[in-house]
Image (cartoon, grey):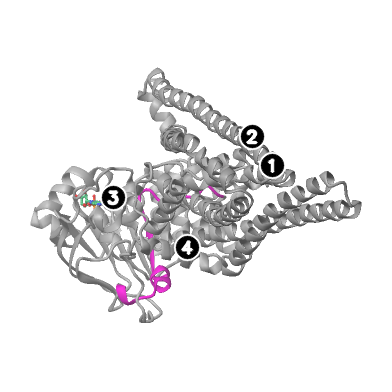
Amino acid sequence: MSMNSPHMMLRRQTSSVRSGGDAPDVKIDRPTISRIFRFAARQKGKLIGFLVLSVLASVVGVVTPVLSGNVVNAITAGGPLSTIGWLAAAIAGLAIAEAVITIANRWLSSRVGEGLIYDLRTAVYDHVQTMPIAFFNRTRTGALVSRLNTDVIGAQRAFSNTLSGVVSNIVSLALTVGVMVTISWQVTLLSILLLPIFLIPARSLGGKLAKLQYEAADHNAAMSTRMTERFSAGGATLVRLFGDPAHESAEFAVRAERVRDIGVRVAMLQATFVTALTLVSALALALVYGLGGWQAVAGTLDAGQVVTLAMLLTRLYGPLTMLANARMDIMSAVVSFKRVFEVLDLVALIREADDPTPLPDGTLSVAFRDVRFAYPSATEVSLTSLEEVSTLDERGGTEVLHGIDVEIPAGRTIALVGSSGAGKSTLASLVPRLYDVTHGAVELGGIDVRQLSFRDLQRAVGMVTQDGHLFHESIRENLLIAKPGASEEDLRDAVHRARLDGVLANLPDGLDTVIGERGYRLSGGERQRLTIARLLLASPPIVILDEATSALDSTNEAAIQMALGEAMEGRTALVIAHRLSTIKAADEILVVEGGEIIERGDHAALLTRDGRYAELYRTQFRQDS
Ligand SMILES: Nc1ncnc2c1ncn2[C@@H]1O[C@H](COP(=O)(O)OP(=O)(O)O)[C@@H](O)[C@H]1O
Ligand SMILES: [Mg+2]
């Protein structure tokens, strides 16, 4: 019974509206539907059980009014008492059966629903992990996270409520109308004719409601994006330094105000809807008693049948309204599914070789063979909806590296120098396959990086960048990422070699101190040393240092240089540097400008040449010599 009450139904209908994004305007296409069912097929057994029980519940719901009518007739006929007793017992039995079915059904539907959430979530999470770095560079994290939360839950809710609701409501409606028609087609017809008076405005009401809720969801999403952005340490600092708090508040307030107004309007529309539904049912009830009563007096019906009709009537309008709005519910369900599928359909640009070549042990050479590279364009790696822009940035695709040929023999160090934007970091990022070359190849120990397993590649290459990321976790956890099984001694040793003992001694919980988001509570230099400690711990045969010492002051630098020298000892190293000490220590120096190597040689030879390197030396390197 409760499943069809107007309040329940309305809540269900409105809550299935997905938050965020635009109102559903997609077509319900066959491939999507069959894909949804394929996903749901994993829950097949439970799903069938659920549908069977739903039908059973509908049958029980129709039998009770019929039995009640029989009781009335038995009463009018003056007995026998035993009949009344049996009927009452049957009604009681059905009530108990209905209670049991309700509980069992709830169990099944929640198992199906939660199972679906689980399947979708893990599928999306696993898939997003395989996405290339280019994808994460473009995507708004918030938008991505909402796919995992809002849309997955929207899809599940729609599935376990709407789809099953449609089935059980159709069954329930068919049974109810069927029984009513056999009792009195005239009363049934009139009751149904009354319906459009209510149904037509109800549909437009539903549309309006959905629109408002989409709008509110958009505002809510915008507010929370804003809050995460402004209330991060970096954002708050920016506003404190340059922003206008009054203006910030005003912008926020405008949205909050709209959400408030929408809230009131939604409440009123819902109240109108429920009241109208109650009113129509009440009017129909009057009609049943009037017309049915008249037929009963005329002798075509008996009193019991009038009671049965009246009771059945209460079961008529709920399912009808639900079905009238089902299209919209199914729409929003399909939209949720589509948004999830959209993410699952993104093709991972960087794929692991099917039959990877094993990497030899020991030191490895690194070679760039006629490497050309263009950053992938947005259309290749991203989705409009995840970037929260209306059209994808079509740029990208312009070549950044134009034919780079470099060979770093095993165990040697090469330094890259050049102006900012020359392409140094881009070149470095090709080694661990953060990106794949557009043309040519990058080889480790003579093997194309694309032929290696991800695991081997990860073990072979260690990279420290200028803005090495730290998770909001303890120092220990941040270090263990590089080497999950590391012993306490390994950790201490890495920390020591990164010259972090002093820092660690001053932290409240030592290695177990949680460092703030992006390591905020550490200074830039300390953060960088921690990322160096991570590299020392991993101790890969190939190390890439991309301005890894940029945030260190001279005292720190001297110490860390020694540590880095130690880390580079016996390893192949690609170092992007702007400190003379590092550059001089390299076996060869490459000058990169405009995506090409324009000069190469050792320090002395390059100075003699008096070209770009000599110029960089005079303007940048010399002061810290
Ligand atoms: N993620 C990216 N997407 C598109 N273009 C990029 C990206 N990163 C860098 N670039 C461009 O590639 C060129 C080389 O950049 P980069 O390798 O970072 O230079 P460097 O490290 O030498 O300062 C620049 O023109 C820069 O604008
Ligand atoms: Mg760079």
Residue segment shown in magenta: 450-473
Q: How many marks?
A: 4
User: Disc 2 or disc 4, which is closer to the eye?
Assistant: 2
Left or right: 494 in relation to 541: right
Is label 4 or label 1 in front? Answer: 1
Q: Secondary structure at mark 4?
A: helix
Task: Classify 372 as above or below 227.
Answer: below
The answer for how far apart the CA atoms under marks 4 and 3 are is 46 Å
Splitting the image into 4 quarters, where does residue 129 fall? Answer: bottom left
Residue 467 part of the magenta segment: yes
Q: Is mark 2 within 8 Å of ligand 1?
A: no
Q: Is residue 312 visible?
A: yes
| Mark 2 nearby-residue class (10 Å; few <14, some 14–19, many ≥20) | some
**Mark 1 lies on residue:** 296
Residue found 25% across the figure and 48% down from its top: 392
Q: Nearer the viewer, mark 4 or mark 3?
A: 4
Mark 2 belongs to which amino acid? Gly
- The residue tagged 3 is 579
Give yes or no for contact between labels 4 and 1 (Cβ–Cβ under 8 Å).
no
Front of the two marks 1 and 2: 1
Q: Mark on residue 118?
A: none
**Residue 360 placed where, x, y %?**
38, 81
Cα distance in 3D space between marks 1 and 3: 103 Å
Q: For the residue marked with disc 3, what is the amino acid?
A: Arg
Q: Which residue is mark 2?
A: 290
